[in-house]
Image (spheres, rainbow, N blue to C red):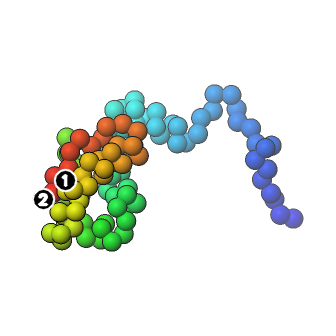
């Protein structure tokens, strides 16, 4: 016999919250949300720019709302300087608030 879970029959106790909501509340309570999101930028970078650009990115980190990038291709760096505003807007849109104010290419 195969057990099949029917989502429509599932119910939660009143006041129960999901694990994701609980983690979100914890990050907000301990004021860790900005640091968590800054570290998440690294994981989101490949999704934002694609594998080809991400593979040419040597270093990426955030400090005081400034995204620092080190690339191993000068022409690519030049292209990203041109698209800097769009990249910042895309990152901030993904996180839902102004996480990044500037980008610096090192």
- Mark 2, other Cα within 10 Å: few <14 / some 14–19 / many ≥20: few
User: In the depicted view, which residue is nearer to us: 103 or 3?
Assistant: 103
Q: Which residue is mark 2?
A: 106
Q: Could you tell me residue 11's position as x and y percent?
A: 74, 38
Q: Could you tell me residue 98's position as x and y percent?
A: 31, 37
Q: Residue furthest left?
A: 106
User: In the depicted view, which residue is nearer to us: 61 or 10?
Assistant: 61
Picture quarter with the N terminus: bottom right
Q: Residue furthest right?
A: 1
The secondary element bearing badge 1 is classed as strand
Asked whether residue 45 appears in the rendered view, the answer is yes
- Whether label 2 touches label 1, CB < 8 Å: yes
Picture quarter with the C terminus: bottom left
* Vertical order, 1 against 25 (above or below): below
From the viewer's perspective, is 2 left or right of 105? right
Q: Which residue is mark 1?
A: 68
From the viewer's perspective, is 82 left or right of 6? left
Asked whether residue 36 appears in the rendered view, the answer is no
Residue drawn at (36%, 32%) of the image: 30
* Quadrant of the image occupied by residue 66: top left
Residue drawn at (22%, 62%) of the image: 79
* Quadrant of the image occupied by residue 83: bottom left
Q: Could you tell me residue 40's position as x and y percent?
A: 35, 51
User: In the depicted view, which residue is nearer to us: 73 or 86?
Assistant: 86
- What distance separates the C-alpha of mark 2 from that of mark 1? 7 Å
The secondary element bearing badge 2 is classed as loop
* Vertical order, 98 against 44 (above or below): above
- Ranked by sequence position, the earlier of labels 2 and 1 is 1
- Mark 1, other Cα within 10 Å: few <14 / some 14–19 / many ≥20: some
């Amino acid at each position: 016999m195969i057990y099949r879970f029917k989502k429509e029959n599932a119910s939660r106790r009143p006041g129960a919250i999901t694990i994701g909501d609980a983690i979100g509340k914890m990050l907000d309570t301990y004021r860790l949300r900005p640091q968590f999101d800054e570290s998440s930028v690294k994981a989101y970078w490949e999704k934002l720019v694609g594998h080809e650009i991400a593979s040419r990115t040597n270093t990426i980190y955030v400090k005081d709302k400034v995204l620092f990038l080190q690339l191993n291709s000068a022409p690519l760096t030049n292209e990203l300087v041109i698209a800097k505003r769009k990249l910042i807007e895309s990152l901030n849109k993904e996180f839902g608030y102004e996480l990044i104010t500037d980008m610096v290419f090192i």
